[in-house]
Amino acid sequence: MYMGKDKVENEDLIKYAWPQDVWFHVDKLSSAHVYLRMSDSMTWETIPQALLTDCAQLVKANSIEGNKKDNLTIIYTPADNLKKQGDMAVGQVSFHSDKGVKRIHVGKRENPIVNRLNKTKVEKQVDHEQEKIDRIKEENAQKRAVAAQRKKEEAELAKQREEEKTARSYDSLFNVEEDPDAPQLTGKAIEEDFM
């Protein structure tokens, strides 16, 4: 999980969010932006309920107004659904599609969850630009490796098909290898030899 500590950091998180990030925010109130970086095997529709609760509690706890209120709605959406326009305030976003936004209800702050998450908190300066470059390099290397493997498999399959085609072909039945020392037979000689 990533969280911006102010609107400037939130702006960087919006700008450099990964495709597998899911954005969380208190609905209709100011709050921290929390990003869940999902593993490759997870989709945003299948985030486990316990993890959703953790993210929602973290967002609520880091909203000045929302932390004091009960019965809040936390919204979440894939980061690529976030829409940032030039005339928006720093840290403010909208959505490309409202249908791609889900909601989770938070009745009240659950201190054991917030305390557990705060114990794992690590503050650090992140070079988002370099992270993006490194991620793109890694993804491109993986794509090249997959493409090379696919090309190798296709070449092996083509070779196998060619061997099968050759094995089924009648062309090899009539190819008699010629002995350079053997006398060359003409059409009439072949006919007489056949008789």
Image: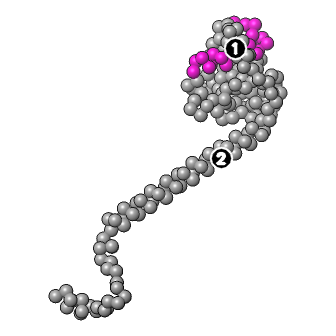
Q: Identify the residue at the far front of this view.
A: 181
Whether residue 132 sits left or right of residue 171 in the image: it is right
| Residue 78 in view of the camera | no
Q: Amino acid at mark 1?
A: Arg
Residue 50: x and y in percent read: 60, 17
Whether residue 185 sits left or right of residue 39 in the image: it is left
> Could you give the CA–CA distance between mark 1 and mark 2, rounded to whole angstroms?
37 Å
Q: Residue at x 34, y 84 (%)?
A: 178
Residue 117: x and y in percent read: 70, 17
Residue 132: x and y in percent read: 73, 39
Q: Residue at x 61, y 31 (%)?
A: 39
Which span is picked out in magenta?
48-70
| Helix, strand or loop under label 2 | helix
Q: Amino acid at mark 2?
A: Asn
| Residue 38 in view of the camera | yes
Asked whether residue 52 is drawn in magenta, I would say: yes
Residue 48: x and y in percent read: 57, 21
Disc marking residue 97: none
Q: Which residue has dot 2 on it?
A: 140
| Observer-nearest of 169 and 67 | 169
Q: Which residue has dot 1 on it?
A: 116
Main SS of residues in magenta: helix
| First-in-chain label (1 vs 2) | 1
Quadrant housing residue 165:
bottom left
Quadrant housing residue 27:
top right
Q: Residue at x 52, y 51 (%)?
A: 150
